[in-house]
Amino acid sequence: MWNKVYVEEHLLEMPRVKSILAKVKQDPIPLGSFDEIWGQSKKPYLHKRDSLNLFLAQKKGQLLKLAPDAYGQAGEPHYYFIHAYNCIYECQYCYLQGYFNTPDVVLFVNHEEILEEMQKTLDQHPNTRVWFHAGEFSDSLALTHLTGELELYHDFCRKNPNAVIELRTKSVNTKELLQLDPLKNFIVSFSLSPFKIGKSIDLKTPSTQARLKTMNELNQKGFTLAAHFDPIIYQDNFKTQYEELLNAMDELGLNKALNYLSMGVVRFTKDVYREVERNYPDSPLHSTPMIKSFDNKVRYNHPMRMWMMNTVKELALKYGIQDEAIYFCMEEHA
């Protein structure tokens, strides 16, 4: 998978780094700091199809970030922790294509330091449930067979019942996950697109059918599950497509098992939107006009967004998902 593997020199003797290198079976190229090379010159996003480099590094600076309003369910503090930069998948709407100067993947290996920061943050919120989300800058499961950190975060949840960790994913790579015991506060959430649209825009990802199969396997073993219908993309038959998806989920008993379901309509920053137009000029993402919205993001107009999400919400209620489990993500007046 990797063209070159770079490792920060001071990490070369770290057991976790040695384990990753043994799995990728490539000789590392030492360097002082990953950002000496990573992102220093513009590497087009679609170069990842032919040449993708891996960097193993120590995350410095801010290890946790406060999530924006409406990122998760309201009423409790939400943070996301940064365990990696960039993703091996190629979803056409992915904001990472306009966020970094390069699609090359960085895996941060100082998970103990990240967990220390999470513990400090949790201690600042006594008697309150605090959410920690993984998957903001990279899929949270796709490379766990290499990185092997899930047990550390699982142990954090086991010791801290007021902490909730959400693993946001499109991956079916559950080998490491299945070695852990299910915990109510260790949530695996899957981003799901309807079958047809998913096939055309969720490039290089496991199919929606494969994700549903994996969700079913995890549900049977007692894992806590959630789902994200995000982004919802307008097509003439989008209602029918979401009805097919919800029916398939219902047949597997997943709808009643969901801890929550978030919904959000496709949105971009201005810079990302330009990249999407350049990278995927024939994408169905461009079939409907968008405008600059309340937060300076490019979206459908507000009445259309509300109509779309309420349409899908009505279907979700019809197929057995509880009203209190549904929330609209990253919207001003939902």
Image (spheres, rainbow, N blue to C red):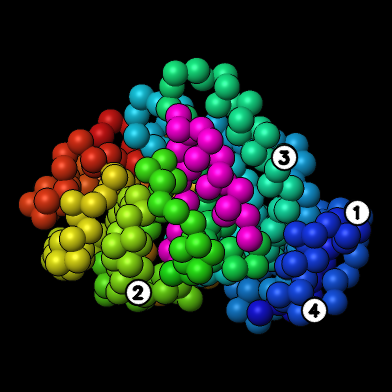
Q: Residue at x 24, y 42 (%)?
A: 326
Q: Which residue is mark 1?
A: 10
Q: Residue at x 63, y 60 (%)?
A: 148
Q: Residues within 10 Å of mark 3 (few under 14, many from 20)?
A: some
Q: Seen in the image, is 211 located left or right of residue 16?
A: left
Q: Which residue is mark 3?
A: 113
The mark nearer the N terminus, 4 or 3, is 4
Q: Which residue is mark 4?
A: 26
**Three-letter amino acid code of the residue under disc 4:** Gln
**Three-letter amino acid code of the residue under disc 3:** Glu
Q: Answer above or below: position of 266 versus 200.
A: above
Distance of mark 1 from mark 2, alpha carbons? 40 Å
Mark 2 touches mark 4? (CB < 8 Å): no
**Residue numbers of the magenta segment:** 148-171
Q: Position of residue 93 (x, y in %)?
A: 45, 61
Q: Is residue 263 magenta?
A: no
Q: Which residue is mark 2?
A: 210
